[in-house]
Amino acid sequence: MSSLAESTAREQVRHRINTLSLSSTVSVNGAAVQDPGEVLHALDDLHWELGHHSHPTKKISVFISDQSGSLVLTLARDSEYPQEYWVFLPKLDYL
């Protein structure tokens, strides 16, 4: 996958997250989240990190929707740094 395509996808997701309303509906692994703002705030800090020979672990499905559309992401906790998560666009399998 080219770094240009990955960068473009990253920017599109970041823009989409930044334009979501606080009245968005969020579900994690199919369960509705009581405080969608908390998830949106965490995703707002999305940024690229250099690889460090780790790998993603158990996948977490996140579905976000508001009046302007929806966003589906797959998150996976990093195998070496549990405070870090890998973020994937399911259609593209990267981000």
Image (cartoon, helix red, strand yellow):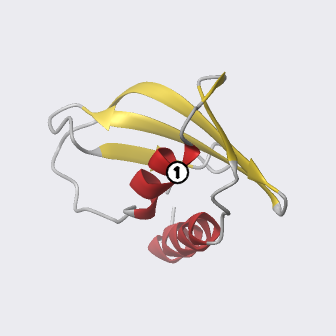
Instruction: Identify which residue, 67 or 50, lies in the foreground.
Output: 67
Q: Is residue 80 left or right of residue 19?
A: left
Instruction: Identify which residue, 77 or 19, lies in the foreground.
Output: 19
Name the quadrant containing residue 62: top right
Q: Residues within 10 Å of mark 1 (few under 14, many from 20)?
A: some
For mark 1, give the secondary structure: helix
The image shows residue 7 at horizontal and vertical percentages of 49, 74
Instruction: Identify which residue, 69 or 93, lies in the foreground.
Output: 69
According to the image, label 1 marks what residue? 37
Q: Is residue 61 above or below residue 18?
A: above
Name the quadrant containing residue 11: bottom right
Could you tell me how many numbered marks the image carries?
A: 1
Q: Is residue 76 left or right of residue 9?
A: left
Residue at image coords 33%, 43%: 85
Instruction: Identify which residue, 84 or 80, lies in the foreground.
Output: 84
The image shows residue 20 at horizontal and vertical percentages of 66, 64
Q: Is residue 85 above or below residue 16?
A: above
Residue at image coords 59%, 23%: 29
Q: Is residue 60 left or right of residue 23?
A: left
Q: Is residue 84 above or below residue 28?
A: below
Q: Is residue 31 left or right of residue 78?
A: right
The image shows residue 31 at horizontal and vertical percentages of 63, 22
Residue at image coords 57%, 44%: 36
Residue at image coords 49%, 57%: 95
Amino acid on which disc 1 is placed: Gly
Name the quadrant containing residue 66: bottom right
The image shows residue 52 at horizontal and vertical percentages of 15, 50
